[in-house]
């Protein structure tokens, strides 16, 4: 690779609410940040239809439009947004040293500070019909999209704590909630199991896997199969929530950054600082708990402010 590497003062990896907000703050501070978007430009919100819980939009707006607005705002202040994926990294271990990032396996850039806002990808079942109907009734976030299923019938796939929490949340909105669990027991904590079992409009179907999501443009039901008997049947519903977990996008830094047992970046206290100087983390990549657009945006602002503070310490030395 060429030794004529481009140098960037504030490099932001990821273009969800965390990345774009970090760009807004860093640009307003005069740092001319560069964002590499990742493969999903705009992050998970680009697969969400109506967003009604982001402050400042009383009538709601489409997820892709919200991300388009954030991008335009970041660019207005001088952030350069580039399509590209970070595929490798050699992160410095001493303050003041440059970090080396490889983009798309062929372009190298160096940076004084790196903000990791690469997000976490929802895990899906891998069915063609499921992917086709994402945004048309298939979702991986009940708190984002559950509101649209008031009085309707929905299903939740999964048997862990997240699935139990999603089912509990949806039970307060939907007429009926099915839980499709492939094992004969739930993996959720006993407290979560007890909560689910007490809710009258939740029906749990054990030994059950999704064979196909039914519907043309909108979900109309699912065909399920009993993995013990092989019996198949159709369950009519209007929404299907996949709650089998998220995978943080940290593979390219996993041997350098401190991660928890699920692969999420560990930050120091209330800051966005990682274990390496000049490397910060924001958004879902460091937040396995909330994973909301508004919390991601908040941490993006913190990351930019932390990066600004770090750069000031370099100038003082």
Image: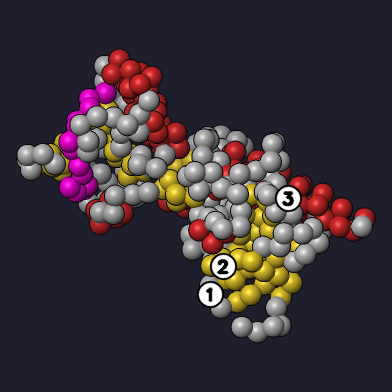
Q: Looking at the rendering, in which quadrant would you find the C terminus?
A: bottom right
Measured Cα–Cα span from mark 2 to mark 3: 22 Å
Left/right placement of residue 217 relative to residue 58 reads left
Instruction: Evaluate if marks 2 and 3 touch, with contact meaning CB atoms under 8 Å apart.
Output: no
Residue that carries the numbered disc 3 in the rendered image: 304
Rendered location of residue 284, percent (x, y): 54, 45
Instruction: Evaluate if marks 1 and 2 touch, with contact meaning CB atoms under 8 Å apart.
Output: yes
The 10 Å Cα crowd at callout 3, few under 14, some 14 to 19, many 20 or more, is: many
Element type where label 2 sits in the image: strand
Above or below, comparing residue 106 to residue 96 in the picture:
below
Q: Looking at the rendering, in which quadrant would you find the N terminus?
A: bottom right
Judge whether residue 249 can be spotted in this image.
yes
Q: Nearer the viewer, residue 213 or 136?
A: 213
Residue 88's label in the rendered image is: 2
Of circles 3 and 1, the one toward us is 1
Rendered location of residue 172, percent (x, y): 37, 22
Above or below, comparing residue 70 to residue 39 in the picture:
above
| Image: magenta residue range | 202-215
First in sequence: mark 2 vs mark 3: 2
Q: Quadrant of residue 13?
A: bottom right
Above or below, comparing residue 213 to residue 202 in the picture:
below
């Amino acid at each position: 690779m060429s030794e004529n590497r481009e140098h960037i003062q504030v490099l932001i990896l990821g273009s969800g609410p965390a990345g774009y907000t970090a760009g807004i703050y860093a640009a307003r501070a005069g740092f001319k940040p560069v964002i590499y978007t990742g493969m999903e430009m705009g992050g998970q919100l680009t697969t969400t239809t109506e967003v009604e819980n982001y402050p400042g939009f009383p009538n709601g707006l489409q997820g892709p439009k919200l991300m388009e607005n954030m991008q335009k705002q970041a660019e207005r202040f001088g952030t350069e947004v580039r399509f590209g994926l970070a595929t490798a990294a050699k992160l410095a271990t001493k303050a003041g040293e440059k970090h080396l990032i490889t983009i798309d396996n062929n372009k190298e850039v160096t940076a004084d500070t790196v903000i990791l806002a690469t997000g976490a990808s929802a895990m899906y079942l891998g069915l063609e019909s499921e992917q086709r109907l994402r945004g048309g009734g298939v979702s991986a976030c009940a708190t984002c999209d559950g509101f649209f299923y008031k009085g309707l019938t929905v299903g939740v796939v999964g048997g862990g704590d997240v699935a139990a929490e999603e089912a509990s949340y949806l039970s307060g909105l939907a007429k009926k909630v099915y839980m499709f669990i492939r094992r004969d027991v739930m993996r959720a904590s006993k407290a979560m199991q007890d909560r689910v079992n007490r809710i009258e409009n939740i029906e749990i179907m054990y030994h059950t896997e999704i064979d196909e999501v039914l519907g043309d443009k909108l979900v109309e039901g699912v065909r399920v199969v009993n993995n013990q008997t092989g019996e198949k049947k159709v369950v009519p519903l209007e929404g299907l929530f996949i709650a089998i977990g998220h995978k943080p996008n940290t593979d390219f830094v996993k041997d350098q950054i401190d991660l928890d047992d699920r692969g999420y970046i560990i930050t120091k206290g209330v800051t966005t600082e990682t274990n390496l100087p000049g490397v910060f983390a924001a958004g879902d990549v460091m937040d396995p708990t909330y994973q909301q657009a508004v919390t991601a945006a908040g941490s993006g602002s913190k990351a930019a402010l932390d990066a600004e503070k770090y750069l000031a310490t370099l100038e003082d030395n």
